[in-house]
Amino acid sequence: MICKYCSKPATIHLTDIVGGQKKITNICKECAEAKQLLKQSDNDLPGILQGLISKHIGKEADELSKLVCPDCGTRYMDFRAQGRLGCPKDYNHFKLGLEPLIEKIQHSKKHLGKIPKRNPDLSGKRSDEILKIRQELKKAIELESYEEAARLRDLLREKESPDEF
Amino acid sequence: MNFESLSKSSGEWLKGCGIESDIVISSRIRLARNLAGFPFPNRASNFQKAEIENLLKDRIQTLEFEQKFEYVSLTALNTLDRQFLVERQLISRELAANDGPRGVALGNLESLSLMVNEEDHLRLQVMRSGFSLESAWETINKLDDFLEKKVSYAFHEEFGYLTACPTNVGTGMRASVMLHLPALDFTKQIDKVFRALQRINLTHRGLYGEGSRFSGHFFQISNQVTLGKSESAILNEIYSVIPQIIDYERQARVAWKKDNGQILQDRISRAFGTLSSATMMTSDETMELLSYVRLGIHMKMIEDVDINTVNELFIQTQPAHLQKLMGSTLDGEERNTARAKFLRSKLRSSGSTSN
């Protein structure tokens, strides 16, 4: 099939129904563009980008919906529904979703205020340790090994009080 | 803690003294803090909340701070006592309504209160009469420094102090100034002020904080943003805008008196007349009328009424305070009768209006 206007190979076939009669126009891409026969949306770049973006966001939202904090068991979706996080570690586990949200409500994502002078738990390392000791303590009590429990209790006390480091 | 003796005074926030105290009732700063290694109160089991409470109670009571604290467990209080602490602004409505182990450590000067297991593990609050955020910050910052040596706060390099709700993350600081703005409210210019505040990220609330109604022409102005600015930058923003609002209110008062002096005088005189002779008064009507009497005193349109008496009445006529003062629990109608009687006895002894 060749183009109705320039005799180049036709790649676009427009179908019009005029007065109940089907009419097919074969046309090449260049002529179609020149005569603006194509609908705007068919080669609308922003539209295509939008499609890609929403596809991408969809994937991200899907990822977010699967996030669960291993420390406190809070799901990212719980937070979105209730507006409250479950534990300080959620800020790391949900960072993907939280960061843009924080930026939106706070117009910033960087703390510029006071910093604890003494042993701030910067990386959350200490709370990891505390959590681990507390779990061990629970286990020790269950197993009735009271000497070990006493040792862990003292250790916990030490870790919870930065003053005594 | 003896709530009965407390009920006879107005507490720090309605003392009515301090800088610009004819318009600025009080200044308040609160800091939200959480302990590393514990879930936030909304996610914590009662067992964990008890652990948090015990740990904080112990550290607070052994603090070598300039004030000593007395810890009051909310589970040990009845509804009336909880309501009493809410009315005095020593605890939030949320803490009163929550369940599980929780409480408040009260400083002996009644200007400091530390809530345990509210939305966050710890909420430090300091209150000052009049316009004095600077002195409030000095105190609360120092108290925070003392506590930080005793507990391990949840802190994040990027996000700062971590809180249960991301609207408090960063500094965890909410600084607020309570203003009495009857003229701006009456002349409907208050909405203009609110819109202007919104643009600079300041927000407004009613007398008892988030979600509370605007009562007695009292408004709290506070920062909305807690991240990305230092504490002093946030305080400075509030500092720079409050004098302008004070100025607007003063101008509105002058214009009101000039344009509608007779109507204003009538309103103030009627407010005083009703308060000192009615036999039944609701809490809402009392707030509204006391607000006009307060305005009348500051505008010298009413004589011989002691401003301290009026300031005290704002809090003493609240439901829980009234019942404490009467020494018995009263239902709604009994309260309205008791309130009217109390107002009459307090206001009749002195006071006449000028013309």
Image: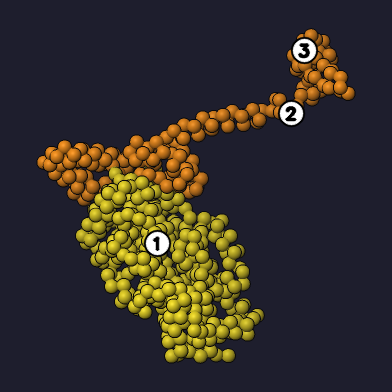
Q: Which mark is residue B92?
A: 1
Could you say whether the residue bearing mark 3 is in a helix, strand or loop?
loop
Q: Which chain is orange?
A: A
The crowd level at tag 2 (other Cα within 10 Å; few <14, some 14-19, many 20+) is few
Number of numbered tags placed on the structure image? 3
What percent of the width, then of the height, locates residue B185? Answer: 57, 70
- The residue at which mark 3 appears reads as A10
Q: Is residue A36 above or below residue A111?
A: above
Name the residue rendered at 50%, 48% in the picture. Answer: A105
Q: Is residue B15 above or below residue B160?
A: below
Could you say whether the residue bearing mark 2 is in a helix, strand or loop?
helix
Which residue in the rendered view is the most extreme toward the left?
Answer: A147
Marks 3/1 same chain:
no
CA gap between label 3 and label 1 equals 75 Å
In terms of depth relative to the viewer, which is nearer, B106 or B170? B106
Name the residue rendered at 77%, 10% in the picture. Answer: A9
Between tags 1 and 2, which lies in front? 1
Q: Quadrant of residue A47?
A: top right
Mark 3 and mark 1 residues within 8 Å of each other at the beta carbon: no
Q: Colour of chain B?
A: yellow
Mark 3 and mark 2 residues within 8 Å of each other at the beta carbon: no
- The residue at which mark 2 appears reads as A40
- The amino acid type found where label 3 is placed reads Ala
What percent of the width, then of the height, locates residue B175? Answer: 43, 60
CA gap between label 1 and label 2 equals 58 Å
What percent of the width, then of the height, locates residue B355? Answer: 58, 90
Check the picture and name the quadrant holding the N terminus of chain A: top right
Q: Is residue A126 left or right of residue B10?
A: left
